[in-house]
Image (cartoon, helix red, strand yellow):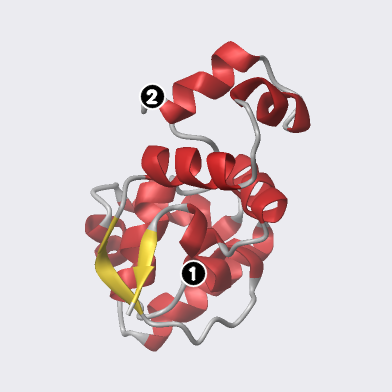
């Protein structure tokens, strides 16, 4: 996700932060943050939420480059609650959604139970399945 790294770099520079300061925002050493900018690894969804808040933008913009004029409140519902809510709203069972994601139902259940958090790519898949933005998918509440 080189584009994600380029957007993080542009946002960081627009806000006058060094790479060390950006890493400190998410509790990571500068080397880990640099890997995000270089596209060698991806931040976690929790880290993306921090960046979106700090840079006054959306996760949708950081991850996909899609402008999103919606303003989000800092508080939101948990990812696992939002996932359950959207799955039920679309009348899907855990097994059906796991099949759509090409994964074992037991692994999917770990998302709803809050045992594990999906990767950015998996959250993008879920957002696409449910027809929502990444911000909506992770439970950020619109102002």
Q: Quadrant of the C terminus?
A: bottom left
Q: Which of marks 1 and 2 is in front?
A: 2
Label 2: how many Cα within 10 Å (few below 14, some 14–19, many 20+): few
Residue at which label 1 appears: 8
The residue at the point 50 percent across, 50 percent down is 35
Q: Position of residue 119 (x, y in %)?
A: 55, 38
Asked if 22 appears above or below 70 in the picture, the reply is above
Q: Can residue 41 be seen in this view?
A: no
Asked if 140 appears above or below 113 in the picture, the reply is below
The residue at the point 33 percent across, 84 percent down is 15
Q: Where is residue 82 in the image (x, y as percent from the top left)?
A: 43, 47
Asked if 19 appears above or below 128 in the picture, the reply is below
Q: Which mark is residue 113?
A: 2
The residue at the point 37 percent across, 62 percent down is 140
Q: What element carries label 2?
A: loop
Label 1: how many Cα within 10 Å (few below 14, some 14–19, many 20+): many
Q: Where is residue 104 in the image (x, y as percent from the top left)?
A: 67, 14
Q: Is mark 1 on a helix, strand or loop?
A: helix
The residue at the point 46 percent across, 82 percent down is 70
Q: Is residue 13 left or right of residue 96?
A: left
Please state which of residues 33 and 95 is positioned toward the viewer in this rendering: 95
Please state which of residues 69 and 15 is positioned toward the viewer in this rendering: 69
């Amino acid at each position: 996700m080189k584009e994600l790294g380029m957007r993080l770099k542009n946002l960081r520079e627009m806000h006058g932060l060094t790479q060390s300061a950006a890493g400190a925002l998410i509790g990571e050493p500068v080397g880990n943050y640099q890997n995000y900018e270089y596209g060698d690894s991806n931040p976690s969804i929790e880290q993306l939420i921090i960046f979106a808040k700090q840079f006054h933008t959306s996760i949708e913009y950081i991850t996909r480059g899609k402008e999103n004029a919606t303003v989000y409140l800092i508080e939101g519902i948990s990812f696992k609650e939002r996932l359950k809510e959207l799955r039920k709203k679309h009348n899907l069972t855990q097994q059906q959604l796991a099949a759509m994601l090409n994964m074992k139902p037991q692994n999917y259940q770990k998302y709803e139970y809050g045992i594990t958090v999906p990767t950015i790519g998996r959250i993008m898949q879920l957002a696409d399945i449910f027809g929502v933005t990444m911000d909506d998918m992770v439970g950020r509440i619109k102002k």
